[in-house]
Image (tube, helix red, strand yellow):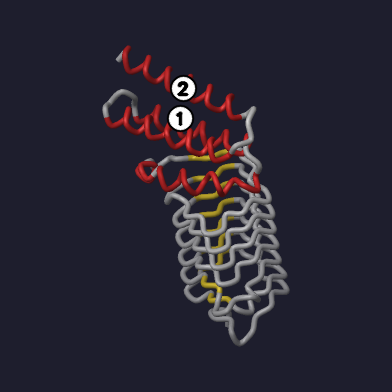
Amino acid sequence: MDEQLNTEKNFLRELEDLINHHSLKKDKNIYIADLIRYLNKVNDAYNQNHISSSERTLLIRVIFNAIPKIINKNVFQMLMTPILKRLKIVEKIDDFVLSDIDFSNTTFSKVKFLPNIQFINCTFADSSFLKASIPASRFINCNLSNCGFTQCNISGAEFENCNLSNCDFSDVNARKTTFVTCDLSRISTLLSRKRAVFLGSIFEGCSLDESNLSKADFRKTKLFATTLSNIKTSKNSLGFF
């Protein structure tokens, strides 16, 4: 046990040194390579029982919380994509949480997020999720206002107490998605080539006021204490009347 504790302390110290080292440099490619090498070492140590599962989770969380503070938000995708591909093991961690991170004005286009990842008190305002995949994820107390979710897959995701106002949901796949006490006012599906699909989704205590849902599929959708004042629908809207 003492040997494992010492190993865990050494890994944490090495991670702190890595972050501090790259905070003084601007070469993103070297930073990505160093992080991937470090993560491989962490996974190898875990597989050999040199570190615990909780310590591995802690190290991964430290990395993801440090990334936006060091690298410009506009190039965050360059770092996130390769790391998510390498961190397939994280899919087995049910409580993987990213909290209090500012992702504003970030491009997540075509990024495939890990299933079951949770975002708490994070800001995504003015970001793009074009063709991204965020299945079965959870967002709690997050600001996602003015985001673009065009052709994004958020099926099975949960949004609780989130600001999603003024978002573009054109051609979104939001099947069986849950929205609880969320502000979805002034969202739009107008630019959909087919329809924004909310089939089987749940809206509880939400506002969809002044939204353009002229190309939205709301069939089998359940609305509880949700307002729909001044919404726009059309013959391409399904499930409203």
Asked if the residues shown at circle 1 and circle 2 are in contact, with their CB atoms under 8 angstroms apart, the answer is yes
Can you say whether 203 is above or below 190 in the image?
A: above
Q: What residue type is labelled 1?
A: Leu
Query: Label for residue 213?
Result: none
Residue 232, image quadrant: bottom right
**Residue at (52% x, 72% y) in the render:** 197
Query: Label for residue 12?
Result: 2
**Residue at (32% x, 12% y) in the render:** 2
Residue density around tag 1, few if under 14, some if 14–19, many if 20 or more, within 10 Å: some
Query: Could you tell whether 70 is left or right of 88 in the image?
Result: right
Secondary structure under tag 1 reads helix
- Separation of residues labelled 1 and 2 (CA atoms): 7 Å
Task: Residue 51: give x, y in percent of width and height.
Answer: 34, 24
Spot the residue most to the bottom. 235
Count up the numbered dots: 2
Look at the image and tell me in which quarter the N terminus lies. top left
Query: Could you tell whether 130 is left or right of 51 in the image?
Result: right
**Residue at (65% x, 55% y) in the render:** 127
Residue 156, image quadrant: bottom left
**Residue at (47% x, 46% y) in the render:** 82
Can you say whether 214 is above or below 127 in the image?
A: below
Residue of label 1: 59
Q: What residue type is labelled 2?
A: Leu
If you read the primary sequence from the N terminus, does the residue marked by circle 1 or circle 2 appear first? 2
Residue density around tag 2, few if under 14, some if 14–19, many if 20 or more, within 10 Å: some
Task: Residue 49: give x, y in percent of width and height.
Answer: 27, 26
Task: Residue 196: give x, y in percent of width and height.
Answer: 55, 73
Secondary structure under tag 2 reads helix
* In-front residue for pair 175/133: 133
Can you say whether 64 is above or below 230 in the image?
A: above
Residue 184, image quadrant: bottom right
Look at the image and tell me in which quarter the C terminus lies. bottom right
